[in-house]
Amino acid sequence: MEYRHLGKAGIQVSELSFGSWVTFHNQVNATAAVDMMSAAYEAGVNFFDNAEVYAGGKSEEVMGTALKQLGWRRGSYLVSTKFYWGIHDNVNEKSTLNRKRLIEGINGSLKRLRLDYVDLIYCHRPDKTTPIEETVWAMHNIIEWGKAIYWGTSEWSAAEIVATIEIAERHHLHKPITEQPVYNLFERHRFTREYERVYKDYGYGTTIWSPLASGLLSGKYSQGIPSDSRAALKGYDWLHDHVTDRDKLAKVQALEPIAQELNCTLSQLSLAWCLKNPFVSTVITGASRVEQIHENMKAAEVAPKLTPEILERIDQIFEVKEEEED
Ligand SMILES: NC(=O)c1ccc[n+]([C@@H]2O[C@H](COP(=O)([O-])OP(=O)(O)OC[C@H]3O[C@@H](n4cnc5c(N)ncnc54)[C@H](OP(=O)(O)O)[C@@H]3O)[C@@H](O)[C@H]2O)c1
Protein backbone atom coordinates (compact mmCIF):
# COMPACT_ATOMS: atom_id res chain seq x y z
CA MET A 1 0.00 0.00 0.00
CA GLU A 2 1.23 3.45 -0.82
CA TYR A 3 0.27 6.66 0.95
CA ARG A 4 -0.59 9.95 -0.73
CA HIS A 5 -0.83 13.45 0.67
CA LEU A 6 -4.38 14.73 0.91
CA GLY A 7 -3.75 17.49 -1.62
CA LYS A 8 -1.14 19.80 -0.15
CA ALA A 9 -2.05 18.97 3.46
CA GLY A 10 0.57 17.29 5.64
CA ILE A 11 -1.61 14.27 6.35
CA GLN A 12 -1.19 11.14 4.20
CA VAL A 13 -3.93 8.67 3.33
CA SER A 14 -3.59 5.12 2.07
CA GLU A 15 -4.21 5.13 -1.69
CA LEU A 16 -7.03 2.63 -1.07
CA SER A 17 -9.34 3.37 1.83
CA PHE A 18 -12.57 1.89 3.16
CA GLY A 19 -16.09 3.32 3.51
CA SER A 20 -19.30 2.14 5.13
CA TRP A 21 -22.11 3.56 2.95
CA VAL A 22 -24.97 1.06 2.35
CA THR A 23 -23.07 -1.76 4.01
CA PHE A 24 -22.65 -1.03 7.74
CA HIS A 25 -25.81 -1.89 9.67
CA ASN A 26 -27.74 -2.90 6.49
CA GLN A 27 -25.45 -5.75 5.39
CA VAL A 28 -22.63 -5.75 7.95
CA ASN A 29 -23.05 -5.98 11.74
CA ALA A 30 -20.40 -4.98 14.29
CA THR A 31 -18.81 -8.47 14.36
CA ALA A 32 -18.44 -8.53 10.58
CA ALA A 33 -17.25 -4.90 10.65
CA VAL A 34 -14.39 -5.91 12.97
CA ASP A 35 -13.29 -8.56 10.45
CA MET A 36 -13.64 -6.23 7.50
CA MET A 37 -11.91 -3.22 9.03
CA SER A 38 -9.20 -5.50 10.30
CA ALA A 39 -8.66 -6.97 6.79
CA ALA A 40 -8.41 -3.45 5.37
CA TYR A 41 -6.08 -2.22 8.15
CA GLU A 42 -3.80 -5.23 7.74
CA ALA A 43 -3.57 -4.45 4.03
CA GLY A 44 -2.37 -0.93 4.95
CA VAL A 45 -5.65 1.06 4.90
CA ASN A 46 -5.43 4.01 7.28
CA PHE A 47 -8.61 5.90 6.34
CA PHE A 48 -12.18 4.85 7.20
CA ASP A 49 -15.03 6.92 5.79
CA ASN A 50 -18.48 7.38 7.30
CA ALA A 51 -21.35 9.90 7.43
CA GLU A 52 -23.98 10.68 10.02
CA VAL A 53 -26.74 9.99 7.49
CA TYR A 54 -25.54 6.45 6.65
CA ALA A 55 -28.20 4.08 8.00
CA GLY A 56 -29.55 7.04 9.99
CA GLY A 57 -26.56 7.10 12.37
CA LYS A 58 -26.33 3.30 12.75
CA SER A 59 -23.34 3.07 10.42
CA GLU A 60 -21.37 5.28 12.81
CA GLU A 61 -22.52 3.13 15.73
CA VAL A 62 -21.30 -0.04 14.01
CA MET A 63 -17.95 1.56 13.20
CA GLY A 64 -17.65 2.92 16.74
CA THR A 65 -18.29 -0.51 18.25
CA ALA A 66 -15.79 -2.09 15.86
CA LEU A 67 -13.11 0.52 16.59
CA LYS A 68 -13.56 -0.03 20.32
CA GLN A 69 -13.05 -3.78 19.91
CA LEU A 70 -10.14 -3.37 17.54
CA GLY A 71 -8.36 -1.07 19.99
CA TRP A 72 -5.94 0.35 17.42
CA ARG A 73 -3.64 3.17 18.45
CA ARG A 74 -5.54 6.36 17.58
CA GLY A 75 -2.61 7.88 15.69
CA SER A 76 -2.53 4.93 13.29
CA TYR A 77 -5.84 5.59 11.51
CA LEU A 78 -8.13 8.34 10.28
CA VAL A 79 -11.92 8.44 10.52
CA SER A 80 -14.22 10.83 8.72
CA THR A 81 -17.86 11.75 8.92
CA LYS A 82 -20.11 14.07 6.95
CA PHE A 83 -23.02 16.43 7.57
CA TYR A 84 -25.81 17.86 5.46
CA TRP A 85 -28.88 15.62 5.21
CA GLY A 86 -29.19 15.09 8.96
CA ILE A 87 -31.00 12.28 10.73
CA HIS A 88 -34.08 14.14 11.98
CA ASP A 89 -36.80 15.29 9.64
CA ASN A 90 -37.20 18.72 11.17
CA VAL A 91 -36.68 22.35 10.21
CA ASN A 92 -33.05 23.36 10.87
CA GLU A 93 -31.97 19.68 10.99
CA LYS A 94 -32.52 18.51 7.40
CA SER A 95 -30.43 19.35 4.32
CA THR A 96 -28.56 22.19 5.96
CA LEU A 97 -25.09 23.36 6.94
CA ASN A 98 -26.25 25.91 9.51
CA ARG A 99 -24.01 26.45 12.53
CA LYS A 100 -26.35 24.90 15.12
CA ARG A 101 -26.80 21.73 13.03
CA LEU A 102 -23.07 21.29 12.38
CA ILE A 103 -22.20 21.66 16.06
CA GLU A 104 -24.98 19.31 17.18
CA GLY A 105 -24.01 16.98 14.33
CA ILE A 106 -20.38 16.60 15.36
CA ASN A 107 -21.35 15.99 19.00
CA GLY A 108 -23.75 13.20 17.95
CA SER A 109 -21.24 11.60 15.58
CA LEU A 110 -18.46 11.54 18.17
CA LYS A 111 -20.79 9.78 20.61
CA ARG A 112 -21.82 7.15 18.05
CA LEU A 113 -18.24 6.64 16.85
CA ARG A 114 -17.00 6.54 20.46
CA LEU A 115 -14.16 8.88 19.55
CA ASP A 116 -12.84 12.11 21.09
CA TYR A 117 -12.31 13.56 17.61
CA VAL A 118 -12.61 12.64 13.96
CA ASP A 119 -9.86 13.35 11.49
CA LEU A 120 -11.99 14.77 8.71
CA ILE A 121 -15.44 16.30 8.58
CA TYR A 122 -17.13 16.94 5.27
CA CYS A 123 -19.99 19.15 4.20
CA HIS A 124 -21.76 16.29 2.41
CA ARG A 125 -23.44 18.60 -0.13
CA PRO A 126 -23.51 22.39 -0.59
CA ASP A 127 -26.31 24.27 1.18
CA LYS A 128 -27.65 27.02 -1.06
CA THR A 129 -29.52 28.76 1.78
CA THR A 130 -26.88 29.08 4.53
CA PRO A 131 -24.19 31.71 3.87
CA ILE A 132 -20.88 29.94 3.16
CA GLU A 133 -19.28 32.21 5.77
CA GLU A 134 -21.48 30.74 8.54
CA THR A 135 -20.48 27.20 7.54
CA VAL A 136 -16.79 28.09 7.33
CA TRP A 137 -16.87 29.60 10.83
CA ALA A 138 -18.65 26.53 12.26
CA MET A 139 -16.13 24.13 10.68
CA HIS A 140 -13.28 26.33 11.91
CA ASN A 141 -14.65 26.34 15.46
CA ILE A 142 -15.19 22.55 15.48
CA ILE A 143 -11.53 22.16 14.51
CA GLU A 144 -10.37 24.71 17.09
CA TRP A 145 -12.32 22.84 19.79
CA GLY A 146 -10.36 19.69 18.88
CA LYS A 147 -13.41 17.76 17.70
CA ALA A 148 -12.06 17.40 14.15
CA ILE A 149 -8.65 17.85 12.57
CA TYR A 150 -9.40 18.80 8.95
CA TRP A 151 -12.48 19.57 6.91
CA GLY A 152 -13.61 19.15 3.33
CA THR A 153 -16.46 19.28 0.86
CA SER A 154 -18.38 16.64 -1.07
CA GLU A 155 -19.93 17.25 -4.47
CA TRP A 156 -19.49 21.01 -4.28
CA SER A 157 -18.97 22.92 -7.50
CA ALA A 158 -15.47 24.23 -8.20
CA ALA A 159 -16.85 27.79 -7.86
CA GLU A 160 -18.25 27.01 -4.39
CA ILE A 161 -14.97 25.45 -3.29
CA VAL A 162 -12.94 28.44 -4.47
CA ALA A 163 -15.36 30.87 -2.77
CA THR A 164 -15.06 28.88 0.46
CA ILE A 165 -11.27 28.82 0.40
CA GLU A 166 -11.20 32.55 -0.24
CA ILE A 167 -13.56 33.31 2.66
CA ALA A 168 -11.42 31.18 4.98
CA GLU A 169 -8.24 32.90 3.81
CA ARG A 170 -9.78 36.35 4.27
CA HIS A 171 -10.67 35.61 7.90
CA HIS A 172 -7.61 33.42 8.67
CA LEU A 173 -9.82 30.40 9.36
CA HIS A 174 -9.15 26.71 8.74
CA LYS A 175 -9.63 26.09 5.03
CA PRO A 176 -11.22 22.97 3.56
CA ILE A 177 -8.49 20.69 2.20
CA THR A 178 -10.27 18.05 0.17
CA GLU A 179 -13.28 17.27 -2.00
CA GLN A 180 -15.10 13.92 -1.97
CA PRO A 181 -16.40 13.47 -5.53
CA VAL A 182 -17.69 10.47 -7.43
CA TYR A 183 -15.08 9.06 -9.81
CA ASN A 184 -15.16 5.84 -11.77
CA LEU A 185 -14.91 4.62 -15.35
CA PHE A 186 -18.48 5.77 -16.03
CA GLU A 187 -18.41 9.07 -14.16
CA ARG A 188 -15.25 11.06 -14.71
CA HIS A 189 -16.25 14.29 -16.38
CA ARG A 190 -16.56 16.59 -13.35
CA PHE A 191 -13.47 15.16 -11.72
CA THR A 192 -11.25 15.56 -14.75
CA ARG A 193 -12.59 18.87 -16.06
CA GLU A 194 -14.43 21.03 -13.54
CA TYR A 195 -12.12 20.45 -10.60
CA GLU A 196 -8.81 20.81 -12.44
CA ARG A 197 -8.25 24.40 -11.27
CA VAL A 198 -9.05 23.47 -7.68
CA TYR A 199 -6.33 20.80 -7.63
CA LYS A 200 -3.75 22.83 -9.50
CA ASP A 201 -4.26 26.32 -8.03
CA TYR A 202 -5.32 25.40 -4.49
CA GLY A 203 -3.70 21.98 -3.92
CA TYR A 204 -7.09 20.49 -3.01
CA GLY A 205 -7.11 16.74 -2.26
CA THR A 206 -9.72 14.18 -3.35
CA THR A 207 -11.16 11.14 -1.59
CA ILE A 208 -13.15 9.59 -4.41
CA TRP A 209 -16.33 7.52 -4.00
CA SER A 210 -18.15 4.66 -5.77
CA PRO A 211 -15.05 3.54 -7.70
CA LEU A 212 -16.92 0.41 -8.85
CA ALA A 213 -20.12 2.35 -9.68
CA SER A 214 -21.89 0.52 -6.83
CA GLY A 215 -20.47 -2.86 -7.92
CA LEU A 216 -21.43 -2.61 -11.61
CA LEU A 217 -17.76 -2.53 -12.65
CA SER A 218 -17.11 -5.82 -10.83
CA GLY A 219 -19.04 -7.58 -13.61
CA LYS A 220 -21.44 -9.15 -11.07
CA TYR A 221 -24.53 -7.75 -12.85
CA SER A 222 -23.77 -9.30 -16.26
CA GLN A 223 -26.41 -12.04 -15.81
CA GLY A 224 -28.99 -9.98 -13.92
CA ILE A 225 -29.19 -8.86 -10.30
CA PRO A 226 -27.70 -11.41 -7.86
CA SER A 227 -29.87 -11.83 -4.75
CA ASP A 228 -26.94 -11.01 -2.42
CA SER A 229 -25.93 -7.79 -4.19
CA ARG A 230 -26.49 -4.11 -3.36
CA ALA A 231 -29.06 -3.68 -6.13
CA ALA A 232 -31.19 -6.45 -4.57
CA LEU A 233 -31.38 -4.69 -1.20
CA LYS A 234 -34.68 -3.26 -0.04
CA GLY A 235 -34.81 0.45 -0.82
CA TYR A 236 -32.15 0.27 -3.57
CA ASP A 237 -34.54 -0.20 -6.51
CA TRP A 238 -33.24 3.11 -7.86
CA LEU A 239 -30.01 1.24 -8.73
CA HIS A 240 -31.78 -1.25 -11.02
CA ASP A 241 -31.73 0.85 -14.19
CA HIS A 242 -28.06 1.68 -13.64
CA VAL A 243 -26.83 -1.90 -13.12
CA THR A 244 -28.97 -3.43 -15.88
CA ASP A 245 -28.23 -0.76 -18.50
CA ARG A 246 -27.24 -2.72 -21.62
CA ASP A 247 -24.78 -0.15 -22.88
CA LYS A 248 -22.98 -0.04 -19.54
CA LEU A 249 -22.95 -3.83 -19.22
CA ALA A 250 -21.43 -4.11 -22.72
CA LYS A 251 -18.62 -1.76 -21.69
CA VAL A 252 -17.93 -3.77 -18.55
CA GLN A 253 -17.82 -6.94 -20.64
CA ALA A 254 -15.42 -5.31 -23.10
CA LEU A 255 -12.99 -4.75 -20.20
CA GLU A 256 -12.77 -8.49 -19.56
CA PRO A 257 -9.97 -9.26 -22.11
CA ILE A 258 -7.82 -6.48 -20.60
CA ALA A 259 -8.37 -7.88 -17.11
CA GLN A 260 -7.42 -11.34 -18.37
CA GLU A 261 -4.24 -10.03 -20.01
CA LEU A 262 -3.25 -8.34 -16.74
CA ASN A 263 -4.21 -11.42 -14.76
CA CYS A 264 -6.57 -9.48 -12.52
CA THR A 265 -10.29 -9.21 -11.84
CA LEU A 266 -12.59 -6.54 -13.25
CA SER A 267 -12.86 -4.95 -9.80
CA GLN A 268 -9.09 -4.76 -9.47
CA LEU A 269 -8.77 -3.27 -12.96
CA SER A 270 -11.43 -0.62 -12.31
CA LEU A 271 -9.95 0.37 -8.95
CA ALA A 272 -6.44 0.44 -10.43
CA TRP A 273 -7.71 2.77 -13.17
CA CYS A 274 -8.85 5.24 -10.47
CA LEU A 275 -5.45 4.99 -8.77
CA LYS A 276 -3.70 6.04 -11.97
CA ASN A 277 -5.10 9.57 -11.73
CA PRO A 278 -2.49 11.65 -9.84
CA PHE A 279 -5.21 13.98 -8.51
CA VAL A 280 -6.83 11.11 -6.64
CA SER A 281 -5.55 11.16 -3.05
CA THR A 282 -7.43 8.00 -2.04
CA VAL A 283 -9.94 5.63 -3.62
CA ILE A 284 -12.63 4.87 -1.04
CA THR A 285 -13.58 1.25 -1.60
CA GLY A 286 -16.79 -0.33 -0.37
CA ALA A 287 -17.37 -3.99 0.41
CA SER A 288 -20.07 -6.19 1.89
CA ARG A 289 -17.72 -9.07 2.80
CA VAL A 290 -14.11 -9.73 3.71
CA GLU A 291 -13.28 -11.59 0.47
CA GLN A 292 -14.07 -8.45 -1.53
CA ILE A 293 -11.60 -6.50 0.60
CA HIS A 294 -8.86 -9.05 0.00
CA GLU A 295 -9.58 -8.87 -3.73
CA ASN A 296 -9.88 -5.09 -3.92
CA MET A 297 -6.70 -4.32 -1.98
CA LYS A 298 -4.68 -6.10 -4.67
CA ALA A 299 -5.67 -3.30 -7.07
CA ALA A 300 -2.61 -1.43 -5.79
CA GLU A 301 -0.44 -4.11 -7.45
CA VAL A 302 -2.37 -3.84 -10.71
CA ALA A 303 -2.07 -0.05 -11.10
CA PRO A 304 1.60 -0.10 -12.28
CA LYS A 305 0.57 -2.50 -15.06
CA LEU A 306 -1.76 0.08 -16.61
CA THR A 307 0.50 1.41 -19.35
CA PRO A 308 -0.49 4.38 -21.54
CA GLU A 309 -1.43 1.85 -24.23
CA ILE A 310 -3.79 -0.03 -21.86
CA LEU A 311 -5.29 3.25 -20.62
CA GLU A 312 -5.93 4.25 -24.24
CA ARG A 313 -7.73 0.94 -24.89
CA ILE A 314 -9.87 1.51 -21.80
CA ASP A 315 -10.72 5.03 -22.99
CA GLN A 316 -11.80 3.62 -26.35
CA ILE A 317 -14.21 1.23 -24.60
CA PHE A 318 -15.67 4.08 -22.59
CA GLU A 319 -15.65 6.30 -25.69
CA VAL A 320 -13.59 9.05 -24.10
CA LYS A 321 -11.94 11.36 -26.59
CA GLU A 322 -8.59 12.95 -25.79
CA GLU A 323 -9.95 16.53 -25.60
CA GLU A 324 -12.43 15.42 -22.90
CA GLU A 325 -9.58 14.33 -20.68
CA ASP A 326 -7.18 17.26 -20.91
N1 LIG B 1 -19.61 11.61 -0.46
C1 LIG B 1 -20.59 10.96 -1.02
O1 LIG B 1 -21.60 11.54 -1.45
C2 LIG B 1 -20.50 9.47 -1.12
C3 LIG B 1 -21.46 8.75 -1.86
C4 LIG B 1 -21.33 7.38 -1.95
C5 LIG B 1 -20.28 6.74 -1.31
N2 LIG B 1 -19.37 7.45 -0.57
C6 LIG B 1 -18.24 6.80 0.12
O2 LIG B 1 -17.51 5.99 -0.79
C7 LIG B 1 -17.48 4.64 -0.32
C8 LIG B 1 -17.44 3.70 -1.49
O3 LIG B 1 -18.62 3.86 -2.29
P1 LIG B 1 -19.38 2.58 -2.81
O4 LIG B 1 -19.66 1.66 -1.67
O5 LIG B 1 -20.50 3.02 -3.67
O6 LIG B 1 -18.18 1.92 -3.68
P2 LIG B 1 -18.24 0.92 -4.92
O7 LIG B 1 -16.87 0.34 -4.98
O8 LIG B 1 -18.72 1.60 -6.14
O9 LIG B 1 -19.31 -0.19 -4.52
C9 LIG B 1 -19.06 -1.03 -3.43
C10 LIG B 1 -19.98 -2.25 -3.52
O10 LIG B 1 -19.67 -3.03 -4.67
C11 LIG B 1 -19.68 -4.41 -4.34
N3 LIG B 1 -18.30 -4.90 -4.44
C12 LIG B 1 -17.17 -4.34 -3.91
N4 LIG B 1 -16.10 -5.06 -4.23
C13 LIG B 1 -16.52 -6.10 -4.97
C14 LIG B 1 -15.86 -7.18 -5.59
N5 LIG B 1 -14.55 -7.33 -5.51
N6 LIG B 1 -16.63 -8.08 -6.30
C15 LIG B 1 -17.96 -7.94 -6.39
N7 LIG B 1 -18.66 -6.92 -5.81
C16 LIG B 1 -17.93 -6.01 -5.12
C17 LIG B 1 -20.20 -4.50 -2.90
O11 LIG B 1 -21.63 -4.55 -2.92
P3 LIG B 1 -22.50 -5.90 -2.81
O12 LIG B 1 -21.59 -7.02 -2.42
O13 LIG B 1 -23.53 -5.60 -1.81
O14 LIG B 1 -23.08 -6.06 -4.18
C18 LIG B 1 -19.76 -3.18 -2.34
O15 LIG B 1 -20.49 -2.78 -1.20
C19 LIG B 1 -18.72 4.53 0.58
O16 LIG B 1 -18.63 3.51 1.52
C20 LIG B 1 -18.73 5.90 1.25
O17 LIG B 1 -17.79 5.91 2.30
C21 LIG B 1 -19.48 8.81 -0.48
Image (tube, rainbow, N blue to C red):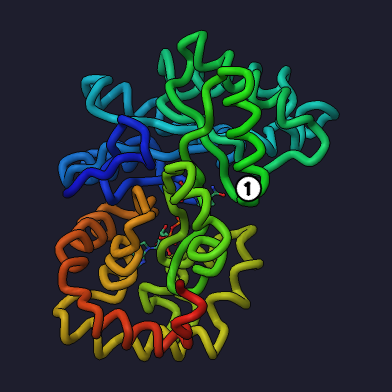
Depth order, front residue of 21/135 = 135
Residue drawn at point x = 57 percent, y = 60 percent: 194
Give the quarter of the image for residue 297: bottom left
Frontmost residue, 214 versus 326: 326
Residue 210 vs residue 310, the one in the foreground? 310
Q: Quadrant of residue 102?
A: top right
- On screen, residue 183 above or below 266: above
Q: Position of residue 113 (x, y in %)?
A: 45, 24
Dividing the image into four equal quarters, which quarter contains ligand 1? bottom left
Could one spot residue 63 in this view of the protein? Answer: yes
Q: Position of residue 302 (x, y in %)?
A: 18, 68
The residue where tag 1 is placed is 156
Q: Residue at x 35, y 64 (%)?
A: 274
- Report the side of 310 relative to 85 (left or right): left
From this view, report whether residue 98 is shown above or below residue 180. Answer: above
In the rendered image, which quarter contains the C terminus?
Answer: bottom left
Percent position (x, y) of residue 84? 67, 36
The answer as to whether callout 1 falls within 8 Å of ligand 1 is no
Mark 1 neighbour class, 10 Å CA radius: few under 14, some 14 to 19, many 20 or more:
some
Residue 33 falls in image quadrant:
top left
What SS does tag 1 mark? loop
Q: Does 80 appear above or below 160?
A: above
Q: How many marks?
A: 1
Q: Is residue 258 above or below residue 172?
A: below
Identity of the amino acid at label 1? Answer: Trp
- Residue 197, horizontal then vertical, whole percent: 52, 53
Residue at 24% of width from left, 75% of height from top? 265
Q: Residue furthest top?
A: 145
In the image, 15: left or right of 94? Answer: left
**Res. 287 visible in picture:** no
Q: Which residue is found at the position 25% from the left and 79% from the top?
A: 308
